[in-house]
Amino acid sequence: MKEEVNEKKHGDNSCGVVGVVFGILSLVFIIIPVMGPILGIIGVIFAYRQNKASPNKWAKAGLWMCWIGIVVGTVWSVYYIIGVVKFVEQYQQQLAALQASGGVGAPA
């Protein structure tokens, strides 16, 4: 009976596997702004819990993939947001120039 308890305590890799899965998802969904880092943070939580309970390769792999997903996803999200802001600013400037020249949307 005592061996079963020890086997369950040390043989359970579920949090590590979940960490790896969320790490892979964070890397796949990097292209969607903010989604990669969110999945990465969730994966870090699971992988850290596994690493704390019984360190193994699953936990380490999950932590590495999640951290890569968080860092690259955050950089991509910032880059994407800066691009959207610049696009909106250029659009507003072009619209203002059109309205000033009597083009589209100018009062009659």
Image (tube, grey):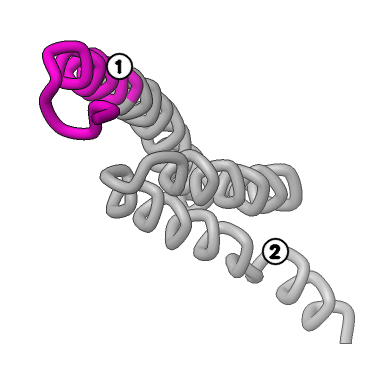
What residue appears at the point 79 percent right and 70 percent down from the top-left corner? 6
Is residue 97 placed above or below 37 in the rendered structure?
A: above
Residue 37 percent across, percent down from the top left = 48, 39
Q: Which mark is residue 89?
A: 1
Residue 44 percent across, percent down from the top left = 59, 43
Q: Which quadrant of the rendered structure holds the N terminus?
A: bottom right
In-front residue for pair 62/107? 107
Q: Which mark is residue 77?
A: none
Is residue 55 placed above or below 73 in the rendered structure?
A: below
Main secondary structure found in the magenta portion: helix
Q: Residues within 10 Å of mark 2 (few under 14, many from 20)?
A: few
Magenta span has 8?
no
Q: Nearer the viewer, mark 1 or mark 2?
A: 1
Q: CA–CA distance between discs 1 and 2?
A: 56 Å
Quadrant hosting residue 18:
bottom right
Q: Residue furthest bottom?
A: 1
Q: Residue furthest right?
A: 2
Residue 69 percent across, percent down from the top left = 39, 38
Q: How many dots with numbers?
A: 2
Disc 1 to disc 2: CB gap under 8 Å: no
Name the N-terminal-most of marks 1 and 2.
2
Is residue 65 placed above or below 19 in the rendered structure?
A: above
Q: Residues within 10 Å of mark 1 (few under 14, many from 20)?
A: few
* 43 horizontally vs 29: left or right: right
Find the magenta span and give its range: 85-108
Q: Give the structural element (helix, strand or loop) at label 2.
A: helix
Q: Which residue is mark 2?
A: 10
What residue appears at the point 72 percent right and 74 percent down from the top-left corner? 7
* 89 horizontally vs 10: left or right: left
In-front residue for pair 59/104? 104
Kind of residue indicated by mark 2: His
Q: Which quadrant of the rendered structure holds the C terminus?
A: top left
